[in-house]
Image: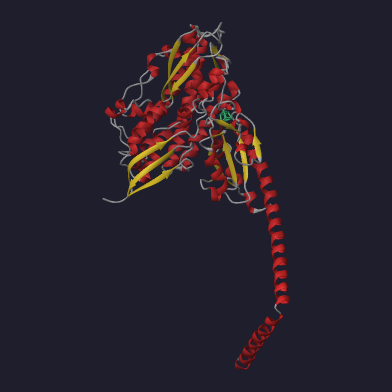
Amino acid sequence: MSERTVIPFGPQHPVLPEPIHLDLVMEDERVVQAIPQLGFIHRGLERLVKTRDYMHFVYVTERICGICSFGHSYGYSQTIERLMGIEVPMRAEYLRVIWFELSRIHSHLLWMGLAADSFGYENLFYQCWRLRERVLDIFEKTTGGRVILSACNVGGVNYDIDNSELAGISQIIQKLKRDAKPLIKALVKDRSIKDRLVGSGYLSQEDAVKLSIVGPFARASGVEEDIRMFGVGGYGELAEFKPQTSTQGDNYARVAVRCNELLQSCDIICEMIDKIPDGPICEKPKGNPPEAQGIGRVEQPRGEVVYYVKGNGTRFLERFRIRTPTSQNVAGMVQLLQGCELSEVPLNILTIDPCISCTER
Amino acid sequence: MSGTSKSPWIIHYDGSSCNGCDIEVLACLTPMYDVERFGVINTGNPKHADVFLITGAVNERNIGVVKQIYSQMLEPKVVVACGACACSGGIFHDCYNVIGGVDKAIPVDVYVPGCAVRPEALIDAVVAGLGALEEKRAALELASSYEAKELAKAAEQERLAEAASQPLLEEPAKTEEQTDIDINADEEPGE
Ligand code: SF4
């Protein structure tokens, strides 16, 4: 048996946009064990509920993660609304879904770019990011921010979009969908990309269930689970929703699932824009959160996020807690890394689409 | 302007940022803003970098990493704090695990406001950073030329002092010179 060496990977590493440290125990070229070390981005923001009242805390939740920023404010608001029994106007629910799906498109395009870069396709990386700018332009036009939107609030949304502008957005999204197709074709059809992806980083359905993997990572292993299919909020208005799944469980399946989700999100946005009702956009909450506990779930681009809030009758919450997708998926990532080759490590890390900032908060 | 200011290489480290500023840093490198047309290249190696872009506040865990990257970079170097968090801790300033802005760990040259920071502001900051880089280079060159002069002066004085304290040593030196000349004289006719 050959000697074992430990290679430290990260926290500052060219393929990692975010700091995570892994100790890779190697036997020649093969990883026998990967030991993750987290904590580089821990800020301790759950505790901020003690000093920010429940309305202001929306702005903190937006900054849990800049990529799924809108999703976090959506999930938090939904949880508080359920706790306080607030009825959200329908137009607000529709607008939330539109922004949320737009952020899914931007997140998936961002990830596709990073993944393309990790297997050596720099041009594809640039093309994906170029397409992503169109979504950011829509954000900027409708809310004023490119990344942090401050659009969602407890009881509804802060900004309305006129119907004429919505029609314009629908056209932009249809064009984006057409323009995304060649990129997707490159990602899932190109032979040399396929050679790098197919068969590597395999996770079985059984393991995915056992490790409670969530999001596209789980769906690529054949676990049909997507919080959107329960039709909470605006998603209940969709004519139909089917989670995108694959049964292959390898890196290729994860890329394909995300590509399909991107196209699906485009369709959802167009459908929502077609059906959006008129009406108010915000129902101002009255009083404080009661002495009770609330739970909420949303499907972020990376998977299911669970929010837990506990009120105590004052403006400040007693406790706030999130379970983020990556904290689940890190277990799966460690499994993927065991037994892979050193050259596959960056790809295996990237295809689970880790978001360390959410995980460590 | 020196070569470095025309093609500054940057290194990016994510402190405890929320990713909002990071993706804007990355967006600068991609076709919409494309800072590469100004010669800005993103590198992962601290030894290659001139500009250190840091997003997010420092905390107990990453302060060591930030200091280490900074110390690995070669002089002259410029630090740009990107976003409200990196400037002062931003919205997280009173979190229990946040020490504060990047300037709590390393000296910062340019502060870029914004939450999230806008790519235009970032490009402006890198340009401002190049001014600082140029100043540092000039100071460094001045210092090194001054240092070289001082060193030469010191060496000269030392030599003089040595010569004054040991006058007897001059004679063997002369003979050496003479032998040199002798050798030359021998060679000349041969050529
Ligand atoms: S300044 Fe704002 S966007 Fe940037 S890292 Fe901090 S919280 Fe995120």
Above or below A70: residue B78: below
Q: Residue furthest front?
A: B165
Towards the viewer: A104 or A193: A104
Towards the viewer: A39 or A196: A39
Above or below B174: residue A78: above
Above or below A282: residue A107: below
Q: How is the image coloured?
A: secondary structure
Q: Position of residue A349 (x, y in %)?
A: 40, 37
Q: Quadrant of residue B31?
A: top right
Q: Position of residue B8 (x, y in %)?
A: 60, 47
* Ligand 1 quarter of the rendering: top right
Asked whether residue A84 is in view, the answer is yes
- The residue lying at 68 percent from left, 45 percent from top is B132
Q: Quadrant of residue A56?
A: top right
- The residue lying at 55 percent from left, 49 percent from top is B72
Asked whether residue B124 is in view, the answer is no
Q: How many marks?
A: 0
Towards the viewer: B184 or B30: B184
Q: Position of residue B57 (x, y in %)?
A: 57, 33
Q: Position of residue A99 (x, y in %)?
A: 51, 20
Q: Quadrant of the C terminus of chain B?
A: bottom right
Name the side, left or right, on which B157 lies relative to A128: right
Q: Residue furthest bottom?
A: B189
